[in-house]
Structures are given as structure tokens and as C-alpha cells.
Amino acid sequence: MRMLQCFLLSFLAFTASAVEGQFVQINIPVACMREGKSHSSQLVSQVVMGTPMQVIEQDDEWWLLTGPDGYKGYVNASGFVNLDSASFLKWRSAPRLKISSIRESVVYSRPFGTGERDVVTTLVNGSIVSCMPDKHDDGYYTGIILPDGREGYISSQSVVPLDSLPLLDKDDVITNCYKLMDTPYLWGGCSTKAMDCSGLVRIVYFDKGILLPRDAKDQYLIGEDVTDNPARGDLLFFSSTHDGGITHVALYDDDGIYVHCSGMVRVSRMDISDSDFAQRIYRGARRIDCLSKCRDITPITSHPWFF
């Protein structure tokens, strides 16, 4: 309980000053956050296009940035654009769209563009873009503006308004896990291109408007304890040893089945005959429910960096 209180106090202190300071915005499909100032430094996380990031240290090539969840890492300057105070305030109040397609979506330079020379960029699930004035949605393609001002068109079926994200739907959370089946594991990965175990959890919950902590050990500190009765969409936690810390997280489906990223996104069963389950120590289950009495769940629409 004391660990949970410390985590919540630090997060509340972080969000309280969230709109102060200098901000940048990710401007490539997926930007890598690294432990040090080099491309060879360990990957600690990733952030997708449109994510606002607060500047901690500024350098010519590598900047130390903090994400909306308070997670820190060095990002190469080629991956973001600067936001002055006026631009950031305007962005927070402007109509914006979130990429909802679980697989990559292509942005074209013109409606109904299909050729290679029409491609502007690709966007992954969770990316945030602005609406193009007067060219928002013709029923097939939606006009969008990228953080650096580039304009393009994306399938209208691939986006949802950021300010009207759907209520948390656990069936959809698990369905999206299955849509990501066989996606490769990447230590520090946090996009639908490749991910680690906690990255998978982050992705499928963010798609439903919930921002979770980055690491499994911190995800273990939030939500409601449902160890004795997990249901679809609940998080399952594991350790490597009986007295060790949390090292793995999965998402429960039904009838003892869970989905997780271990080598790749795949299915395992809570049974000693399952080799994956047998090699881990089950430490319990937590329920993420923004409508529960728990106050440690952060809907995107309540986060001061987004609204």
C-alpha cells in the first residue's frame, strides 16, 4: 500500500505541473526513447506521432524528454518538432483525431491516393493528428495535419475524435490483442510494429482512452485486486522467482486463457501443463476500470497534456 501511495503522489505532483515548461511533439511514426545519448544505447520505450513530450534537457542531437506518463528517455532531435506555449495551448483545444486502426494506416497526399508516390507517411495505433479545416471527412477519407504542418488524407475508418474516445470496453481490448497476434517482441517496444509485454498492455488500453504506466511493475500498483476472480481484460502479473519483483504482465481472456507478448504476441493458458505459465510465478491480477472507485486510472480526456 505504501508503494502505491508513493507512486500516486509522484504522479499527481507530475500532472499538477504538467502544462508548465517547454514541450515538443513527436513527428515520426514511432520515436525511440533511449537510456543514453546514442542510437546504440538501450531502448527504454517508444512514443508515437503526435505525442506531446516535456523537455528536461536540451542538446543539439539528443534531448531528455518526459512522456505523458512521466516516463523519461533520450530522443533524437530528428524525431520531434518544437511547440511554443501558444502552439501547445492551441493544439490542446483544437479538434484532433486518434488513429484507431490496430494495424498501420497510410496517409496519402490526395483523397483516394493509392500509388507509392502519393504516400506521405504511415501512422500506427494511438497516433494523434489535427483535423484539416473544411476538409475533415467526405465519408471515405479524412483530411489531417501532421505536427510539422504537412497535410494528407487517411481512411475515415482509421480515425476517431480524440475528445470522444469510447468507454473502456474489455471485449475490444482483448479483440485488439488478437489482432496483434504474432507481432514480434522488442525490449522497450511500445507500438504496434513491435512491443514488450507491458507495451502490449499500454497499446490496447490507450486505444480505449486509458493511459497506463509504462512498466509492468508500475501497472501492478494500480487498479483493483481481482486475483481470485480475473475476468476478460484484467491484467495478470508474474515474477521469475517467488521472492522477486514483477517481471511480466499479460491480459486475461476467458477460461484460463491469457494473451501476452513473450517472443511474440501469443496465447497461453493458466495451467501447469503450459510451458510458459509453468516457468513463471503467478503474482495476481488487477482490474483497470475507469468507472470504479479507484482514483489511479487516467483517462486521456482528463490528462492536462491532451485537454
Image (cartoon, rainbow, N blue to C red):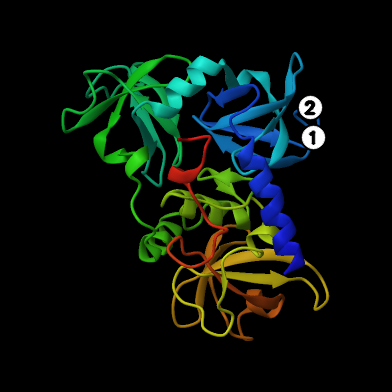
Q: Identify the image quadrant of residue 39.
A: top right
Q: Identify the image quadrant of residue 91.
A: top left
Identify the mark at residue 122; answer none if there is no mark.
none
Residue 112: give x, y in percent of width and height. Answer: 22, 24
Q: Nearer the viewer, residue 11 or 183?
A: 11
Residue sitting at x 56%, y 64%: 260
Give the vertical position of 191 relative to 61 (above or below).
below
CB-based contact (under 8 Å), mark 1 and mark 2: yes
State the SS at label 2: loop
Give the vertical position of 23 relative to 218 (above or below).
above
Residue sitting at x 27%, y 33%: 155
Task: Report if residue 187 is visible in the image.
Answer: no
- What's under tag 2, amino acid-wise? Ser
The residue to which callout 1 is attached is 41
Q: Identify the image quadrant of residue 160.
A: top left
Residue sitting at x 51%, y 56%: 182
- What's under tag 1, amino acid-wise? Ser
Identify the mark at residue 38; answer none if there is no mark.
2
Number of numbered markers: 2
104 on left or right of 228: left
Residue 211: give x, y in percent of width and height. Answer: 53, 49
Quarter holding the N terminus?
bottom right
User: Residue reaching furthest left?
Assistant: 139
